[in-house]
Amino acid sequence: MNRLRRMPIDVWFEPLIILVVGVGYFAWYGSVTLTTTEQASLGWATLQNTILQHIKLTVVATLIVVVIAIPLGIALTRPSLKRFEPIAVNIANVGQAAPAVGLLVLFTFWLGTGFRTAITGLVVYAILPILQNTIIGLRQVDQRTIEASRGIGFSAARTLFQVELPLAVPVILNGVRTALVILVGTATLSTFIGATSLGTLITTGVTLFLPRLLISGAILVGLLALIIDWLGRLVELAATPRGVA
């Protein structure tokens, strides 16, 4: 109960925004009469598939980034590999600095179009926040705490998994949450390389001048970003050690 009272206001306020926007949109969606052209994109079966494909893009890309970035971040904080940290971070920064559309289009020359290419581009684009936060989180662990754990007989591996990582979890999860939100927005661009996403609604709405499609795509992307950000915040709070919260 004490922990609940200490929760930041955004943990309670964000779901209210999600609820209001979500109820408002789906109330409009249920009452509006769609034209034949709009029905092709906004019919429930098609819309449901589009949302699921967008979520699939985001989740798969995030899982791949986590599997790559967190172990790499851990390795780069070890004394033997510390000297390679600036190189790795600068390489990861190239993906973040490059325009997302340009990055996705470049990968089409190598991998062609479709889901696999979109995932590759998204992974490259989102690796920096998780890698950087993993390094920062581990570096922020008090050196005296590490020395104390080694002093009582913990091995380097046990110190890492039982002392350093639990204390670094809030910062690492913050990086994962940031990457997820970035990916939700960036995944809309995958429509330009033949992968289905909510960006399909936006580009179709712009191309055919159908405001309902454009607004639907924008609102649904915003809702997904808010939901993922909120869920990530809850996980972050739950995983934070009590002494750190």
Image: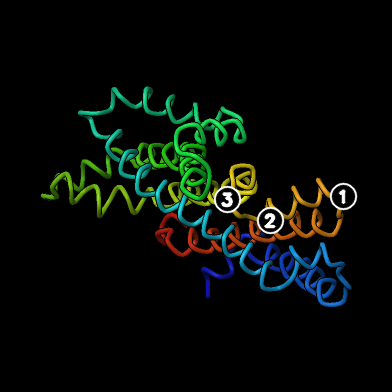
Residue topped by disc 1 = 209
Q: Marks 1 and 2: which is nearer the front?
A: 1
At x 52%, y 45%, the residue is: 118
- The span from disc 1 to disc 3 (Cα, nearest Å) is 21 Å
* Residue 43, quarter of picture: bottom right
Pick whichever of labels 1 and 3 is earlier in the sequence: 3
Q: Amino acid at mark 3?
A: Ala
Q: Which residue is mark 3?
A: 195
Q: Please report the residue visible at 56 percent of the width from the left and 63 percent of the height from the top.
A: 231
The residue under the point 24% across, 47% down is 160
User: Disc 1 residue type?
Assistant: Phe
- Secondary structure beneath dot 3 equals loop
How many C-alpha atoms fall within 10 Å of the one at disc 3: few (<14), some, or many (≥20)? many
Tag 2 secondary structure: helix
Looking at the image, do the residues carrying marks 1 and 2 touch, with CB atoms under 8 Å apart? no
Residue 245 position in % (x across, y down):
47, 57
Q: Is residue 183 above or below residue 99?
A: below
- 10 Å neighbourhood of mark 1: few (<14), some, or many (≥20)? few
How much space separates mark 1 and mark 2, taking CA atoms?
19 Å
Q: Residue at x 66, y 73 (%)?
A: 45
Dots 1 and 3: beta carbons under 8 Å?
A: no
Q: How many discs mark residues in the rendered view?
A: 3
Judging by the rendered image, the residue that carries numbered circle 2 is: 221
Viewer-nearest residue: 100 or 47:
47
The Cα–Cα distance between marks 3 and 2, rounded to whole angstroms, is: 16 Å
Q: Earlier in the sequence, mark 1 or mark 2?
A: 1
